[in-house]
Amino acid sequence: MTYSVMFSALALYLLSTLFYLLFLISDRKAIESAGHFSLLAGFVVHLALTVFRYIQAGYTPITNTHESLSFLSLSVAGFFLFIKKSYKISILGSVIVPVLSVILISALTFPAEIKPLPIALKSYWLPVHTVFSFVGNAIFLISFFVSILYLLVERGIKKKKFLPISPRFPSLETLDSVNYRCMSYGFPFLTIGIITGSVWAGMAWGSYWNWDPKETWSLITWIVYAILIHNRLAIGWRGRRTALMMIVGFLSIVFTFLGVNFFMGGRHSYL
Amino acid sequence: MPVVVFGLNHNTAPVDVREKLYVPEAAVPDLVKDLKKEDIGEAVILSTCNRTEFYFSCDDFERSFRKFYRLLVEHFGLKAEWLEQYTYVFRNEDTYRHLFLVASGLDSMVVGEPQILGQVKDAYRLATDNSATGFLLDKVFHRTFNVAKRVRTETKIGYNPVSISSMATELAKKIFGELKEKKILVVGVGEMCEIALKNFKKEGVGEIFVTNRTFRNAQALAEDIAGIPRPFDDLPNLLGMVDMILTSTGSEKPIIDTNLVNGVMRKRKHKPLFFIDIAVPRDVEPGVNDLANVYLYDIDDLKNLSQHHLKDRLKESEKAHAIIEEEVARFTTWIQQLDTNPLISRIYEKVEEMRGTELKKALQKLKDVDEETIRSIDILTKGIVNKLIHPHVALIRQNGSPTVLDIMKKVFRIEEENEKNMDNRHKG
């Protein structure tokens, strides 16, 4: 049942996508609000469905590709709605909403029926580890697009082009502080995700760290963001460099998520 | 009686020549007096950082202009070759067109910028305060204000008020988000700086430091703009403290180079730094723009940027020019009609004089009236007077026979002698 109802969440996201693409062409408040509220509605339906699935299945529904992608898309929608409350970054909706819609669409292409939970995943660490990891990833996905926009606007200002100066683009300061916000939320989530994963591994596999490809790549990702945070706090890295590092960090996440599954296998291959 | 404009602007003359001919407000009264001695009937002097223009009426163009020219040589050290190279002279119809274009912002460095109309109004007011204008220039300037207003309301030329300085503010906002509490350093004491600063102040910027090679000048400017004067040697320190730098010195070589800024950036923990260099030649080395988190815009960059607006507004600009052509034609015909019969202008003058006295009396009786009411009364009385004299004027235009003229003179109590004077004034 949830599978077919999921299309209503998708429909709302797609509606929001439509409004946000329209918003690119015509800079009108009404269009932005329409995009915002259809996104919010989509998020609420999506969240309700996820909770419903949790109750139906009896476990946190982040155990296979369908569930993880769906949860990622939900987290992106949620965090974007959260962060756009404090900053004028509506224009990012024109990228992020289509992206989260595509993620949900790809989730729907994977088998979605509820199966009994594999023994290996039966643990109270499952919700903590997966939720923290995926919310962290969702936050860094948003910061990835924030960083790209930062580089575009920055380049526009440096090269003295008119377009980035138009009022619809956020200021560099805004984008940089959004990035900083993303970092200060995303990094703890990622850290907790890794630590809980390690603890869980210790309990399930007998060893806290197995140099499983997913573990290794998570660590690489974590180090990238750790360097970034260190440099920001210690020597005042900001702006362009932060944006570039954020992009590198996110590419590392994408590789951890997709590349490792497709090319390396390993013990995380339920996803 | 020709109406002449002589002047130079940002398109025709380089800064150093424009500077020579700059007329500060305080110098206008004396200059006007001198002009009057030289057979120049009425005069308005418009002097901004982009242009200096003398609008005047005279009896005999050739003779008056020679005298006028001599006066310029005396006052400003004007060189003969500049005349050919850098200046323009228009007469009558072309003067009206030029003034309409200027006041509408179509002749500005940034087309459609709104500041110029205020500057034209100030120039006109300064002239009237010094009793330098009369019937003719009053008409010309009043019509100009109407035309500028018409251009503004009927086209979108000034819709997005973009001037170089507001472009700089926009850019700063793109870099810093909010400009509240952002600190500014002003290097040099050029005029454009003051205009740019006004815009920044509106955004609520924090402290403004002023520095200049000659410390006394820095102090003077600092006093004008409520800034803090600092010695020139302090420049590297100041660069570490502020967020934006406005430079406009007359230095031949850049005073801020890449090395200096590079060192400063490390000290300021790479907080963004925005240079606005409005000096020609430039004060800041272009390489500074390549440093991370440093943004440098010079006057040409700002100008080019505003051209983007211009492209969008090309159609609007065509519309504006069409309006101006229409107004020039209408105004020229109107003025020519005045010339064909001096009695008409005499009637207008006489009636206007009467209206002026009555209006003054009335306003004295009415205490505590606000500007708006005064303007309404002014417009009302003008309307009544014009309606009343219109049939008479129309009659003279239709039938200028001596009998009619004679009757009209009696009706309006115009003395024979006055009329002769008028005859002289309006021929030529």
Image (cartoon, coloured by chain):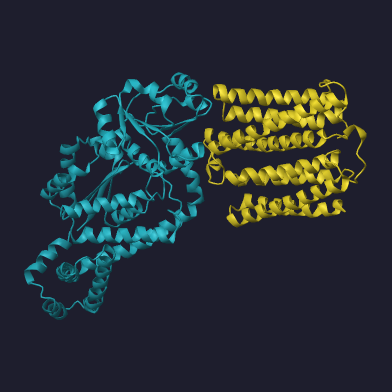
Chain colours: A yellow, B cyan
**Image position of B124 with respect to B184: above or below:** below
Q: Residue at x 76, y 43 (%)?
A: A73
Where's the N terminus of chain A, which quadrant? bottom right
Residue B124, how many percent across, how many down? 24, 53
Residue B373, how many percent across, how many down? 27, 67
Residue B406, how many percent across, how many down? 12, 78
In the rendered structure, the answer to whether residue A66 lies left or right of residue B57 reads right
Residue B253 in view here: no
Q: Residue at x 67, y 50 (%)?
A: A21
- Of A193 and B338, the residue lying toward us: A193
Residue A93 in view here: yes
**Image position of B6 with respect to B59: above or below:** above
Residue A54, how many percent across, how many down? 83, 46
In the rendered structure, the answer to whether residue B112 lies left or right of residue A114 reads left
- Of B249 and B67, the residue lying toward us: B249
Task: Residue B377: name its quadrant.
Answer: bottom left
